Amino acid sequence: MALPPPDPQFVLRGAGAAVHTLHFSCRGEGSDVPLLFSGSENGLIHVWNLQTHRVDTALDGHEEQSVYCVETMGSKDRLLSQGRDQRICLWDLAEGRTSVTDSVFTENVGFCRCSLLEVAQGRWLMAMAAKALEEVQVLELPSKTSVCTLKPEVGAKLGMPMCLKLWQLNCDSQPLLLAGYEDGSVVLWNLTMGKALSQLVCHQEPVMSLDFDSEKAKGISGSSEKVLSIWSLNEQQNLQVCKTHKLVNAGISDITIRQDKKILATAGWDHRIRIFGWKKLKPLAVLDYHTSSVHCVSFSDHKNPHERLLAAGSKDHRISIWSIYTQT
């Protein structure tokens, strides 16, 4: 018989608003405390201490507008955040500082999270939805120089970009971008040429979230409908649908594949977190704790696999922390 799903290991309360984004920083050396960054609808970023289960710092840089993306850049002292105030902020958190050192005005009114990729020591690419509705802009950070603007062909009718994922096979290969659009398409872009390599209609509704496993050249996406779509990239860099998985309830806010590529988690509008095996998309667990939509899921980056955690943020203002499938 299957084991009943566990309860959360602990719950973080005190965000004070719906939680829209989560990002772990647990790879520190020796005495470094493992942290979880969360972004809330009230414009605050909370830095949670995972030993005390309390907030160490609250950062206020988005004028009380919802924060829907938080990422560290190389270390837990350098943070990037994105909010509905159309700003992407770069933070310096070293030695107790809480200052915004630079920002990018996106002029985009949507809620598409930006995507970051480190391409060299201290050099990053950032893809973000641009001012023109269907376009994606790619900048280099920290210089903020424009790398390219990705424009769909005339008449493509993709709608707005909804989710973005920058990736490269290894440090020598050229970076590529996967983008999910309002019309249900996933598009692979070449940044060097600034053109689309392949396009695949994966959903009938807007693509809400996607993740990609570059080693297996396989990705997964979710939308507002009852379907997860699994697709792959062949050697000619064409996207093709592998299979679809029907869900019990409609609506996926977020999807993330764990770093070891063994399992993935989805955040559901039905208040539930679902865990699947990544190899065959076998349903493994339904984690039922939240009382409202789950907006985001994130796996921790602990070096020791047994310490790995899963965090989920919800409209109910709470963050649940789970320890599941940590035996490799």
Image (cartoon, helix red, strand yellow):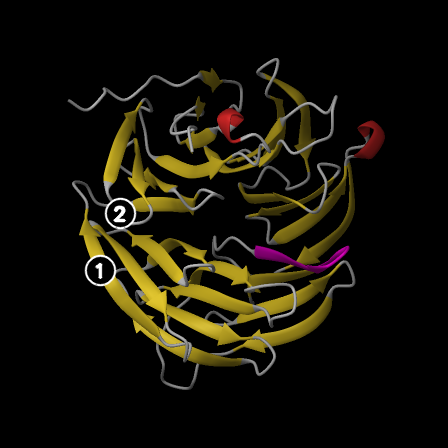
Q: Main secondary structure of the magenta part?
A: strand
Residue 39 location (% of width, % of height)? 55, 36
The residue shown at (59%, 20%) is 50
Q: Is residue 97 above or below residue 237?
A: above
Say which element carries label 1. strand
Q: Which residue is mark 1?
A: 243
Residue 166, visible in the rendered structure:
yes
Residue 213 location (% of width, % of height)? 44, 56
Q: What's the mark number on residue 281?
A: 2
Magenta part of the chain: 115-123
Q: What's the mark number on residue 302?
A: none
Amino acid type, callout 1: Lys
Tell which of 200 and 171 is nearer to you: 171
Residue at the extreme right of the image, as rendered = 95
Tell which of 56 and 35 is nearer to you: 35
Mark closest to the chain's N terminus, 1 or 2? 1
Amino acid type, callout 2: Leu
